[in-house]
């Protein structure tokens, strides 16, 4: 479901450090490396609690019947994976009954006020998500939206429209949900935020959205079964070792490039996964992203002719479209486009990929790693989540950092709390 093609990367398989890959693989499966108490995601697609899953399905189906809009409130790992899955699988302009919108990832008063205005008179529900249960951004957004919902439907009815996803025991959100009688689902202790999309964090909202989450798990299990080998025949490790080799050659940044607008948030999720996992100890590739054709008409100039030996691209090529459309013949042909008549948009998009790779690699001297995806569906989504999770574990350990912590994220929080006068922060 994901094949790694290095023919445009300037690397050959002998440039990749297979001996180290083998060692790191042992560390991953024996859980003997740094941050090993956060490796619960490795077996999760097979071992998750099936009873809790059935309960989630029931609660989600009842909520889906009562609402038109689900607001998920969360940030970072409690936000990006949901949006990535929803946009990739259902699409951006889908006509499904339930719309998913987002809060808690911004403290913009304009955004929150306008969201609140939009929800006036609408049948909405809230899924509030926070592993720590204490994050400020979702905390203040939830306080505002919870009050609005209670004002709109009353205290009793609101209890059927609010679900919390959080730690099993600790944190303010758990205390709040228990005291108010909101159903809660658990984020396992040994799965960090950015690795949590296949836990209730992603699965509950996606069930409300009507996504086939059984298929997401099927895709993740397929990846688990295929990506077990401890050498470079493992495609995820091949990708990790290739990006590590380019980093060691001096490249500072990697742009994930997708030609599918629906994958914009897959790229955002990927940025968090790689950025938070590797950007530490003054090391790590800076993960960025571009959506083509959009960015070909902006950043494309920089990619073609800007500073060299800084950035490389990792290009996602989707083999089969979920839906396709043909360019039709026009009798007048005023726009001169009849030469494309009979071709599908996907064919034209795929031809653009070939042309752009040739321009960027051969003329622009920009290394390209190509990742071939089958489709943009639920099974592929489950597969890609596991693929990138195991890849970042390998990549982080090849870099000799702990891929499972994020100490740098705390620094801004401390400053903000100090300035805001949070009790107990000096
Ligand atoms: O990867 C992580 O752990 C973080 O990005 C968190 O997901 C993010 O900070 C949100 O944390 P929480 O779910 O505790 O509110």
Image (cartoon, rainbow, N blue to C red):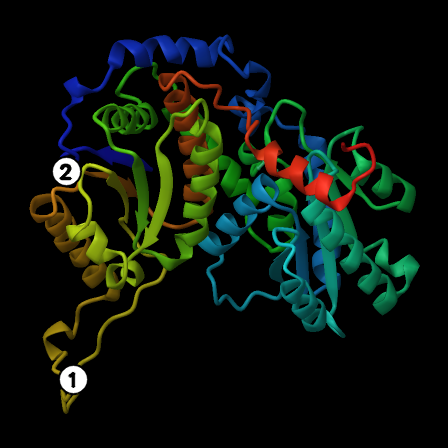
> Which residue is more in the foreground, 179 or 200?
179
Q: Which quadrant holds residue 368?
A: top left
> Which residue is more in the foreground, 5 or 357?
357
Where disc 1 sits, the SS reads loop
Does residue 129 appear anywhere in the picture?
yes
- Residue at image position (90%, 46%) is 180
Category of crowding for the residue at label 2, using alpha-carbon neighbours closer than 10 angstroms: few (below 14), some (14–19), many (at least 20): some
Q: Is residue 177 left or right of residue 68?
A: right
Please provide percent x and percent y for residue 386: 45, 32
> Which residue is more in the foreground, 196 or 340?
196
Q: Residue beneath label 1, please? A: 335
In the image, residue 121 above or below residue 250: below
Q: Which badge, 2 or 1, comes first in the chain's sequence?
A: 2
Label at residue 8: 2
Please provide percent x and percent y for residue 40: 58, 22
In the image, residue 69 above or below residue 265: below
Quadrant containing the C terminus in the rendered view: top right
- Residue at image position (14%, 91%) is 332
Q: Is residue 149 left or right of residue 84?
A: right
> Which residue is more in the foreground, 255 or 329?
255
């Amino acid at each position: 479901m994901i094949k790694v093609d290095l023919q445009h990367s300037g690397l050959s398989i002998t440039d990749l450090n297979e001996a180290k890959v083998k060692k790191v693989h042992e560390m991953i499966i024996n859980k003997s490396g740094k941050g090993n108490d956060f490796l619960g995601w490795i077996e999760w697609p097979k071992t998750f609690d099936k009873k809790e899953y059935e309960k989630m399905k029931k609660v989600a189906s009842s909520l889906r019947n009562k609402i038109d809009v689900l607001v998920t409130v969360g940030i970072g790992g409690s936000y990006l994976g949901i949006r990535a899955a929803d946009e990739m699988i259902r699409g951006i302009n889908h006509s499904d009954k339930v719309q998913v919108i987002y809060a808690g990832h911004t403290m913009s008063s304009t955004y929150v006020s306008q969201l609140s205005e939009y929800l006036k008179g609408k049948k909405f529900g809230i899924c509030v998500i926070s592993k720590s249960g204490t994050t400020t951004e979702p905390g203040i957004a939830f306080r505002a939206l919870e009050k609005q919902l209670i004002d709109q439907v009353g205290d009793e009815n609101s209890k059927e429209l609010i679900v919390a996803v959080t730690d099993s025991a600790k944190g303010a959100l758990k205390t709040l949900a228990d005291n108010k009688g909101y159903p809660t689902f658990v984020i396992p202790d040994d799965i960090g935020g950015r690795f949590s999309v296949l836990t209730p964090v992603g699965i509950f909202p996606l069930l409300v959205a009507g996504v086939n989450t059984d298929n997401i798990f099927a895709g993740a299990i397929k990846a688990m079964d295929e990506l077990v080998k401890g050498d470079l025949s493992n495609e995820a490790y091949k990708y990790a070792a290739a990006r590590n080799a380019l980093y060691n050659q001096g490249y500072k940044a990697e742009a994930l490039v997708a030609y599918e607008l629906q994958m914009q948030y897959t790229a955002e999720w990927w940025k968090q996964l790689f950025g938070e996992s590797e950007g530490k100890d003054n090391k790590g590739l800076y993960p960025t992203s571009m959506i083509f054709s959009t960015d070909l008409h902006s950043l494309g100039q920089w990619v073609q002719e800007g500073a060299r030996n800084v950035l490389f691209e990792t290009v996602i090529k989707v083999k089969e479209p979920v839906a396709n459309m043909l360019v039709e013949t026009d009798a007048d042909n005023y726009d001169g486009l009849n030469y494309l008549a009979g071709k599908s948009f996907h064919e034209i998009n795929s031809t653009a990929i070939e042309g752009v790779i040739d321009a960027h690699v051969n003329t622009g001297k920009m290394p390209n790693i190509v990742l071939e995806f089958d489709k943009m569906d639920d099974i592929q989504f489950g597969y890609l989540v596991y693929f990138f999770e195991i890849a970042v574990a390998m990549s982080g350990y090849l870099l000799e950092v702990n891929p499972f912590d994020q100490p740098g994220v705390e620094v801004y929080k401390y400053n903000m709390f100090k300035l805001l006068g949070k009790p107990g922060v000096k």
